[in-house]
Image (spheres, rainbow, N blue to C red):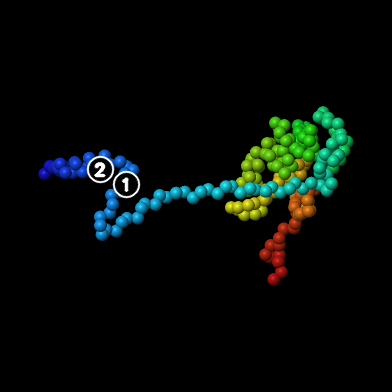
Amino acid sequence: MGYVRPRIGPLAVTVAVALAIVPAGAPAAEAAPGSTPKAPAVKATRPEAKPPLLVQAEAPPFSEGIYPCSACHAGMPKNGTRRELVFHDEQQSIFDHGADQRWCLDCHDLQNRDVLRLANGAPVPFTESYRLCGQCHGDKYRDWRVGVHGKRVGHWNGEKTYFLCVNCHNPHSPRFKGVQEIVSGGKKTVAPTLTYLKPEPRPKRPEEQRR
């Protein structure tokens, strides 16, 4: 038996045309007397995104009495010529940070010794020294920002404190040797050691432990 196409009557066509010409924003017809009115549809909305919380970086672990640098440098002539310095012996004796390619004023600002400088000459405060480190060590900077590299304390989804690169790496000899606890600015923090820490002895094996 073949397919029989259903016939569409005049009434069905009239209803379809009437529905098509009703404006989309037209108010719904009032409910019939005695019927229960339907509750208006509630449009789903996204919750407002909270503004990102500020992240406080740890203060740099300056040696006692070394900052502000302008206390000594303010009265000195500004000489940008690369040379071997006759002061700051503690930095000169350990300097091992690409000594053939860079020197002090590649990172320290000549005009204002209380700040650092980026490669484009822009000044950057010591509290944001990670920006200077990130120019060459971009992969480490990326990992540090997301918490993979370095140390941070606080809440995983809230306020947190990042330790700076210089809290674990001496900027003049950055190969990691160890850290020590110090007091800087009236609070405890950590600073890199200048010599390699002696590793602790390995734990005893089960057969070596006394019963």
The span from disc 1 to disc 2 (Cα, nearest Å) is: 13 Å
The secondary element bearing badge 2 is classed as: helix
Work out whether residue 6 or residue 32 is closer to the camera in this orientation and state it: 32
Of callouts 1 and 2, which one flags the residue occurring earlier in the amino acid sequence? Answer: 2
Q: Which residue occupies 63% across, 45% down?
A: 145
Foreground mark, 1 or 2, reads 1
Q: Quadrant of the C terminus?
A: bottom right
Q: Residue 119: image x %, image y %?
A: 71, 32
The amino acid pointed to by label 1 is Pro
The amino acid pointed to by label 2 is Leu
Give the residue number, with chain letter if any, for mark 1: 27
Q: Quadrant of residue 207?
A: bottom right
Work out whether residue 139 or residue 59 is closer to the camera in this orientation and state it: 59
Q: Are marks 1 and 2 in contact (CB under 8 Å)?
A: no
Residue at the far top in the pictured view? 81
Q: Residues within 10 Å of mark 2 (few under 14, many from 20)?
A: few
Q: Residue 14: image x %, image y %?
A: 19, 41
Q: Residues within 10 Å of mark 1 (few under 14, many from 20)?
A: few
Q: Which residue occupies 76% across, 38% down?
A: 115
Q: Against 202, is 84 above or below?
A: above
Give the residue number, with chain letter if any, for mark 2: 19
Q: Which residue occupies 74% across, 58% down?
A: 201
Q: Quadrant of residue 25?
A: top left
Q: Residue 163: image x %, image y %?
A: 70, 49
Q: Is residue 91 left or right of residue 206?
A: right
Q: Which residue occupies 85% across, 41% down?
A: 71
